[in-house]
Image (cartoon, rainbow, N blue to C red):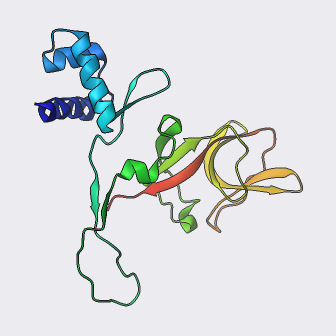
Amino acid sequence: MIDSYKNKIISFYKRTKRMPSYAEIMKLLGFKSKNAVYKLVNKLVGEGMLEKDSSGRLVPNKLFGEVPMLGLVEAGFPTAAEEELVDTMSLDDYLIENKEATYLLEVKGESMIDAGIQEGDLVIAERISREPKIGEIVIAEVDGGWTMKYFRKTDGKVWLEPANKDFKPIYPENDLKVAAVVKGVVRKY
């Protein structure tokens, strides 16, 4: 029965792109009380399927399950290999360190192609409250416009460097605010 409940919650999430409230779970699963929902939610949190953020809202954790990790693939000369289940991996666990501070952005433009980031890719960005490290790829607001570039600092002055020789570095005239650091890139073939 619990798998049926999980599937209904997953379906709701996939359809609405958000987690249901306790009242919506009660209606969705046909429960008569919020106490029953509370117990189910605590069970799903205990299993690791759901988490609660700092304000108590439900957040999907391993909602889409784990993918089998079968080993290594040679990117050089071919070698003999056997398929062997090495482990399983949740892509969320691999790509996202701080779920509450993480979001996706679709890439537009070609200024970061030499960093392996192409137009149409999704970048995984994590909000930061610290100054980024030199060389990190950042999402920044520069003089009122948003961009993604390498963070650089020379003689105490910050600037942004593209990863494409056809683009020029950006030196802020008035203001540069770094909102996030790029943590990963997702490309669908």
Q: Is residue 10 visible?
A: yes
- Image location (x, y in percent) of residue 114: 57, 68
The residue depicted at 45 percent of the width and 52 percent of the height is 95
**Quadrant of res 59:** top left
Q: From this viewpoint, which residue is outermost toward the top?
A: 33
The N terminus lies in which quarter of the figure?
Answer: top left
The residue depicted at 24 percent of the width and 73 percent of the height is 84
Q: Where is 168 relative to 98, above or below?
A: below
**Quadrant of res 89:** bottom left
Q: Is residue 122 visible?
A: no
The front one of 51 and 119 is 51
The front one of 52 and 112 is 52
Q: From this viewpoint, which residue is outermost toward the left?
A: 1
- Image location (x, y in percent) of residue 158: 80, 50
For this view, does 38 lie left or right of residue 160?
left
The residue depicted at 33 percent of the width and 28 percent of the height is 18
**Quadrant of res 15:** top left
For this view, does 172 lie left or right of residue 146?
right
The residue depicted at 51 percent of the width and 60 percent of the height is 117
